[in-house]
Amino acid sequence: MPAPTGVLLLRIESVIAANRFGLGARPGELSRIDGNPRGWLLDQLQGPSRLPKDIRSLPDTASVLLEVQEVRQMQREANQAAETDKPSPDVVQKFGAVVRKHYLSQTNARFRAATDTDYPFHERLVHFWSNHFAVSADKQPVSALAGLFENEAIRPNLSGKFFDLLLAVEKHPTMIVYLDNQRSIGPNSMLAQRANRRRRDQQFGLNENLAREILELHTLGVDGGYTQQDVTTFAKVITGWSIGGGGDRGRFSEGVPGTFEFRDNIHEPGKQQLLNTTYKETGVEQGEAVLRDLATHASTARHIATKLLRHFVADDPSEKLIAKIAEVFQLSGGDLPTVHAALVDSREAWQSTFGKYKTPQDFVISAFRAFDRVPDDGKFFVGALDMMGQTPYRPGSPAGWPDTAEHWGGADALYKRIEWSSTVARYAGTRVNPLELGNAVLGPALGDHTRTAISRAESIMQGTTLLLVSPEFQRR
Amino acid sequence: MLNRRELLRHIGLGTVASSLPGISFAKADTDARLVLVILRGAADGLAIAAPYGEGKYQSLRGELALPEPGASNGLLKLDGLFGLHPSLANTHDFYEKHEALVVHAVSSPYRERSHFDGQDVLENGVGTAGGKRDGWLNRALAPLGGSLGNEAAIAMSQNTPLVLRGSNSVTSWAPSQLPDADDDTIQRIAMLYAEDEFFSTRLSQALDSQRIAGDIGDMEKTRRRGNDAAQTNSMMQSAGKFLTAPDGPQIAVVESGGWDTHANQGSMSGGLANKLAGLDQGLGALRKQLGPAWSDTVVAVVTEFGRTVRVNGTRGTDHGTATAALLLGGAVNGGRIVTDWPGLATNNLYGGRDLYPTTDVRSIFKGILWEHLRIKPDYLDRAVFPGSISAPITQDLIRN
């Protein structure tokens, strides 16, 4: 079944722009891109002027944290009354319900935005950076907050420097809670000293979690040239980076509840030396100074370049290309739009072989974009992605989701895509013409073999299934 | 109606492997089965098997210390030095029946503190993170003679963990809540994939697993995101089902996450106790599902590294070095503790903070692969764990 001439006239570059950089084409989109695929991408680097409606209408982190803490307080009181450590089933259920409500509405907003957006490259970048700075909803209360973290720390900071993004992330209450930094106490801080004088049995100490992940995952990378001593020292530097109000301990009640709060009384005093630099700053400025240096470090540039290329271009990007993007990162002082534009401007990103296997998330989003339908229930995405092994906001660790076919290419995961495709094809029903749909969203990239298979399908539903599970639709 | 396998043969998909030269297709002539359980997040070996007999144990572990055997909710006694966590009742029963052993002060060659690199080293088997792109258990599959459509190993997850990734064909399975695609559609998809090796290989593997899993029945309905313990339970049970299927795999890999107890780890009860109880119940469920095949089975429970000996400032423990591993199954020469115990004296701690590693986990893996799966030592040293001369085979892990 040869392609209709109109489709062949579309440029392969448009398909690449929509798929490799975007979230898959909606019907009609390829024609709109076709005049200037590169320009279409570059125009998205600042993002839309307004947040999508679903995202705008979500509550903010502070109010959700407060709500969660109230339920926890109820739990504590109930336990005290019953003289038990075991929370009552009612309270557990209530906590679960509150968390689930927020998780679902945030997931819903995220995927509706991704399905609906006219700025799919920008949205991909939001997803990329949110995954780079991953918080995982398998830890409480992060599941009520992960989407808000993405909207508050990541979204507004993609048109500036990497440092600003980094600072917003590390000061966000969700990151602080996720990596336990509100619990990290300088051994020589005022609080620890006072406590040591009074009650010898109570231990206060550092928690290295956030410091380690900033170095290993957020900035330098695991081979970025830091030592265990650097981790411990950096943990001291950021003691006191906490959240205001409530928390787990009554003594930490100062500050605006649910927002970043620097607590001087648990901050390790004095100058600190790490990565061959002495930091004489005091208070919160000491940590900010370290982050400023980390944000423009050569190892950070390389780490970020490698991850961006692996996400958008190839599982194994060439050394030459990594060096090139890392150089752009360094020369621009980590200016994100400049770095993102350099991806678009690299010749290797426009090769016509589709080398990347879509993640489950991008597979599902691109299917809905192809149908031009925005599901109105977040559960739809959660259920599908859970089965395919990529539960929204639950990568399970601060390393985030991997970005290679090696990880996503399990036999069972493919079978789940097939089952899911045949299920949504049934929902999509008979209003679609699968071959026209294939032409509209894949244009000249849809191969003759797949065209023939679709055109010979015994039903529209089967044809739609074949389109979704085809190698062309699953690769980018 | 044709079953899926026959269907694939009909349309020429099942024949890919048989056209490859020089590969033997008969699976190894052994009933030996292996289940590798990976606990991700660095499980605390000093809580799994606590050295209660060490003078310094109580003081070093502070509020995380577990009560001695005999005390209320105390450790389950292994010997005069070690006791199992009170949540590990099934494991303790296996130990008493000489069907379980504890390996202590064990670690991979990895000596840094990144989970992700630690897991990489545990799974690639070559001592450095990123040192190989395939896993040691995949490399061990070659002498077992599995083939496409007749895989020797299965990952109990949608995607394949590094330890099983590589050039030898493996399969994967996880429960589904979706209706099956109908057979005609599957057949057409198989034809659609015929020219694309990536997709055709995976489809063929998935269809085989579907066939074996077909009569798992109510396990199909298991909510993957249900509670953690139920999930481990169901995965272990399913693994047992696959390992006892007539033409099923002989090796299964089960993963469990959430062992990174930086805060509020708990002692007899609490977060870690719940995780351990879930694991223990899963082991019981696996044993039941395996039935008589249990006597030919080794279950190895391992983690990427251990945790600090001392409690941190947030009632938890931080990333450490050596930890404990469990071997269970009727084939295990059990009822004992395999360790060159370094002790907890401060100057015996690794870096002044961690349990000192005295056994390379690769020695344990080699012992299992040689004595249980009969993979020759020279092949283990050359192909499965290259560069592991410093980790000699641990003998007698398997019952004669």
Image (tube, helix red, strand yellow):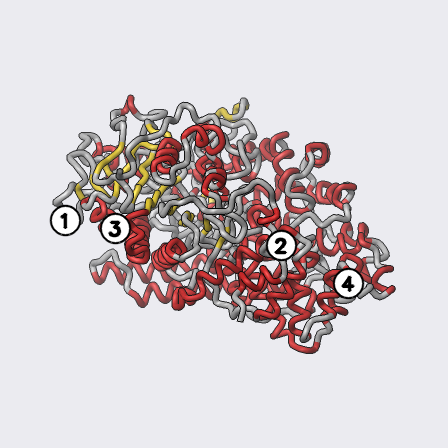
Residue A296 at x, y percent in the picture: 63, 33
| Chain identity of mark 2 | B
Residue B257 lies, with reference to residue A214, above or below; the image says below
- In-image side of B214 versus A337 (left or right): left
Q: Nearer the viewer, residue B185 or B103?
A: B185
Do the residues under discs 3 and 4 have CB atoms within 8 angstroms? Answer: no
Give, as a three-letter code, the residue at label 2: Phe
- In-image side of B1 versus A91 (left or right): right
Q: Residue beneath label 1, please?
A: B72
Give, as a three-letter code, the residue at label 4: Glu
| Chain identity of mark 3 | B
The answer to whether marks 1 and 2 sit on the same chain is yes
Give how far apart the Cα atoms at labels 3 and 2 are. 46 Å
Element class at badge 1 = loop
Give how far apart the Cα atoms at labels 1 and 3 are. 12 Å
Give how far apart the Cα atoms at labels 4 and 1 are. 68 Å
Q: Residue beneath label 2, please?
A: B199
Q: Nearer the viewer, residue A244 or B24?
A: B24
Q: Which of the two labelled residues, at mark 3 and mark 2, occupies the earlier sequence position?
A: 2
